[in-house]
Image (cartoon, grey):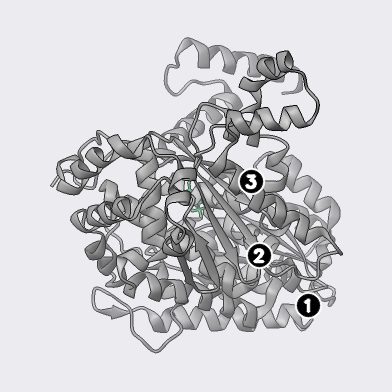
Amino acid sequence: MHLTELPAWKALWGHFTRARDWHMRKLFEADPQRARTFWLEHGGLHLDYSKNRITTQTLTLLLQLAREAGVPEGIAAMFDGQRINTTEQRAALHVALRNRSAQPMRIDGEDVMPKVLGVLQRMAAFASKVRNGEWLGYNNQPITDVVNIGIGGSDLGSLMVCQALRAHAHPRLNMHFVSNVDSAQLKETLRRVHAETTLFIVESKTFTTQETLTNAHTARDWFLHRAQDATAVARHFVAVSTNLKAVSAFGIDPSNMFEFWDWVGGRFSLWSAIGLPIMLSIGERNFLQLLDGAHSMDLHFRDAPLEQNMPVVLALLGIWYINFFGAGSHVIAPYDQFLHRLPAYIQQLDMESNGKRTTRSGQLVDYETAPIIWGDSGINGQHAFFQLLHQGTHISPIDFIASLDNRGSLPGHHAILMANMFAQAEAFMRGRDELEARAELAAQGVDDADIARLLPFKTFDGNRPSNTLLLDRLDPFCLGSLIALYEHKIFVQGLVWGLNSFDQWGVELGKQLAHAILGELRDGVAASPHDASTARLIALYRGQRQPQA
Ligand code: F6P
């Protein structure tokens, strides 16, 4: 049945006509148990979702919606290896990548576990050689720098995890990530490394991505110019891809290729060989811990009843705001410097998965889908964009994320960080009413006339929803669990909206036009006519380039 026809959807609209006027302050006052009721724990994560505009009845209706929308069946289909990526006729079985149990996971009857574990072993053997200095460059020196060349899902996950787990990084290996085809990034990186001690990892699921292949070719030219020996490439270039043919055509020996499969989506691939930079940086044992953390969340997601299921609950809260309150965006605010790339990572994960308006059956939706995901380090955000979140006109739910453990922080720092995070979540929930604002101004000695003038600016509505996610510590296990939590949350939202969360046709049009325009920029021949704006921009660019051409 169409989403908007489901009984729970209709019941939620009825419920919303009352709920939109609730204030969370009142909800907390009315129920001293609220912080216990709306609290979940799993996999080293503590989720406080009590600062949401919900009651137990809201949750009951949302859970009913999940059942009516077929969420339990969708979860089972994913774990069952069914081809749930319907437009590409592929399974989405990234959960197999972190299944190190003996349990088979099948696609069309074939157990994928032997090949998953086989690649994992090859990665581990390679990583160990590089890390212990056995893998030598062309003049027999150990590797000191690893340059990952990839973009999107072949960049963001490894980059984010390497940053997050810096405390576990190998002391000799400097990790670099090059994604931008703007040569400034590659140039800057190459300036900092030496050909004889650098390992390049070219990561691309398709091995056809223009940005990645351009950077990879330039890096190889740079390398050959220095090494002056084509056979040296084998010691300095490895590839991670599903496309053996294209990797060989590029000139990377297939024995230096680490494989993954079409049933691993790019944005869900950090657990596969795409995670090679992570394993190089933090080592096999820690990488396996990352997988174990994700696996633990997978089992929870598969087996926990919906009302205790962390990804399901987070997904439904999102739906409550997006579809009923009209919240168009969602903020990721990590209070941990090492997690500063998490918002960018979740941005791709969510927006590329559910940024869609066509259902699995090909109908256009008549409801909102994925929110705009944005964010930054929370403490920096407080001094930048939080003003809008406190007093602006948009509702933008926030996920506050931090580690309970201070990882040997310098004295005093961690407590300040956490105090700020707790205070922000409290301020967003409570706000400050006129009475409080008036009392504060009076206590500062402000006279009555000025109080009256300042009151509208000094009051905060509050009632702004947030989730607080605390990790026991920022270690590989908890991080794995956290990432899998978001993966599954996004999948559940896709299920409710009736979307295929595993394709990304929306990125194709721009790529095709860029190919056509590139030919035009180079040789001036237009492959197809353009609108006046694009034609003028191209003409301006070509005009500027003429003297150098
Ligand atoms: O253009 C989008 C996209 O296809 C992403 O889905 C993907 O993660 C990224 O490009 C990189 O693709 P590839 O790994 O094939 O180079």
Badges 3 and 2: C-beta atoms under 8 Å apart? no
Cα distance in 3D space between marks 1 and 2: 38 Å
Report which quarter residue 324 is drawn in: top left
- Give me the disc on residue 424: 3
Task: Please say if 171 is above or below 443.
Answer: below
Residue type for callout 3: Gln
Q: Secondary structure at mark 3?
A: helix
Q: Is residue 327 left or right of residue 139?
A: left
- Residue labelled with disc 2: 403
Cα distance in 3D space between marks 1 and 3: 50 Å
On whether ligand 1 comes within 8 Å of the CB at mark 3, the answer is: no
Residue at the spot 28% in from the left edge and 46% down from the top edge: 497
Q: Secondary structure at mark 2?
A: strand
Given residues 487 and 53, the one toward you in this image is 53
Q: Is residue 474 left or right of residue 78?
A: right
Residue type for callout 1: Leu
Looking at the image, is mark 3 or mark 2 earlier in the sequence?
2
Residue at the spot 66% in from the left edge and 51% down from the top edge: 421
- Residue labelled with disc 1: 136
Q: Nearer the viewer, mark 1 or mark 2?
A: 2
Q: Position of residue 326 (x, y in %)?
A: 38, 33
Q: Position of residue 358 (x, y in %)?
A: 27, 39
Crowd rating for badge 3 (residues with CA inside 10 Å; few <14, some 14–19, many 20+)? many
